[in-house]
Amino acid sequence: MRIVILGAGLAGVTSAWELVRDGHEVTVIDREIEVANFSSYANAGLIAPGHAFAWASPDAPKIMLKSFWNNDQAIRFRPKFDIHQWQWIIKFLGQCNNTRSRINTEHKVRLCSYSQRCLNEVVSATNLSYERTTGGLIYFYLSKKSFEAAARKSKLLVEFGLHIEALDTHSLTELDPGLKSARNEIAGGLYVASDESGDSRIFTQELAKICQSDGVHFEMGTTVHQLVHKSNTICAVDTSAGHIEGDMFVMALGVHSANLLRPLGINLPIYPVKGYSVTLPIMPRHNPPKFGGVDEDNLLAYCPMGDHFRITATAEIGGYDTSFKPRDFNTMMAKARTLMPEAADYNNPQYWACLRPMTPTGLPFIDKSHVPNLWLNTGHGHMGWTMACGSARILADLIAGRPTAIPRQGMTLMTSEKK
């Protein structure tokens, strides 16, 4: 069967990998000139089932409100004259309660853990190299109060099958000497030995090469204008390179998915949440952390990746603008430099900003639409790296008519319509 995948990021390329293995003729379309050149370009690098708490939490609304006058908040709300933003915000706020937070967390942990197993299978089958670091991730806290609260909260993830250790400052810095410079700041942390990290862009690019050798065709530098609808099915994609035909189509375009689907009567609650990242060179004189992790009180993620060090922070709900200025990174750079001054060369930063395709629940849509030959694998938000391989496997199983390995609770269009 001829399958056309819209999007050459993590979701699209992992989908191509699974579908070509099932014997399909696969074409991938993307407006960027290289794969993984948008949201997958410079993300946090963490593969983190141990950080799969629902983003929509009871604390989120007050953080968003505080961002109106305090710009250093982890979640910033920038209101726009955009009905789709406000529709998304209303749905998001509807998830910000204890009941929905627990349900969404359970579904996220299940998908993230399954996806990590799928990633291991991909790596085993391909021997891909992508600056992978196994052995765990560390989530540390700067106040005793927040550490104790997190230790209590982590019991929820333990209930869902993860092993999490609460470590005092001494134990944590012995585990990762790269954090010793912050020992007077850190009150304690949670260690998840099964979590890991790696460069998602390298992974996606290398997997795309294997896909190409297996016959997948990539139409790069090609903008998708619309889906051509005929007799209740999609017959082609109208692009800057002309019509591209297929028997089946997969929407994996992240933040651009919702706008392309609306003319078909498919209203996905996906809205861009802007994230900022800095990549710094690591020289022999530097002493970066051994493992990646998160400063949870500042929601500052960090990750060593071979000869570079990645810092990411901020979730800005403010539209589709990807522009940035160096001053946008001042707060996160200052915090990272205070905690990890010897981690990397802070004088040579490479800045990046991207748009994460967030849903109100934090779960992606992996489902068949009401258009018989149109499938969805989109909306992975800030955990696309963690969720990618499992989502692609679920998609391939659905297309093949096989039972999925895990339930798809929270990942269907019916779920979206009810919430």
Image (tube, grey):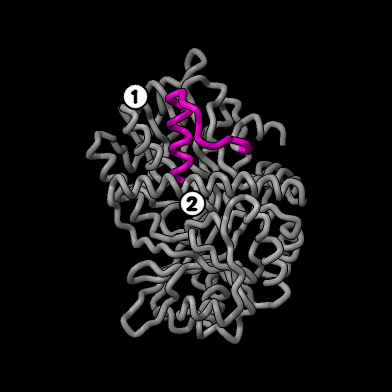
Tag 2 residue: 386
Q: Locate residue 306, reporting x and y percent.
A: 34, 68
Determine whether 403 is above or below 201 in the image. above
Residue drawn at x 28%, y 35% as measured from the top left: 217
Q: Residue furthest top?
A: 231
Image coords of residue 120 (percent x, y): 39, 49
How far apart in space, not on screen, are marks 2 and 1 (Cα)? 28 Å
Q: In this view, does 276 lie to the left or right of 348?
A: right
The amino acid beneath tag 2 is Thr
The quarter of the image holding the N terminus is top left
> Residues in magenta?
388-410
Asked which quadrant contains residue 287, the reply is: bottom left
Q: Which of 90 and 31 is in front in this view?
A: 90
Instruction: Bin the neighbour count of mark 2 within 10 Å (Cα to Cα): few under 14, some 14-19, many 20 and up.
Output: many
The residue indicated by pointer 1 is 2
Placement of 230 over or under 32, stated as above or below: above
On whether residue 408 falls in the magenta region, the answer is yes
Which residue type carries mark 1? Answer: Arg
Instruction: Identify the element where label 1 is drawn.
Output: strand
For image coordinates 72% across by 37% down, the residue present is 419
User: Which sits in the foreground, 211 or 5?
Assistant: 211
Instruction: Please provide percent x and percent y for residue 144.
Output: 70, 77
On residue 387, the disc is none
The count of marks equals 2
Where is residue 153 shown, x and y percent of the image? 69, 61
Give whichever of discs 2 and 1 has the lower sequence position.
Answer: 1
Query: Foreground residue, 405 or 314?
Result: 405
Left/right placement of residue 355 relative to residue 32 reads: right
Q: What crowding class fits label 1: few (fewer than 14 Cα within 10 Å), some (14-19), or many (20 or more)?
A: some
- The reply to whether the magenta stretch includes residue 146 is no
Task: Assign a secondary structure to mark 2.
Answer: helix
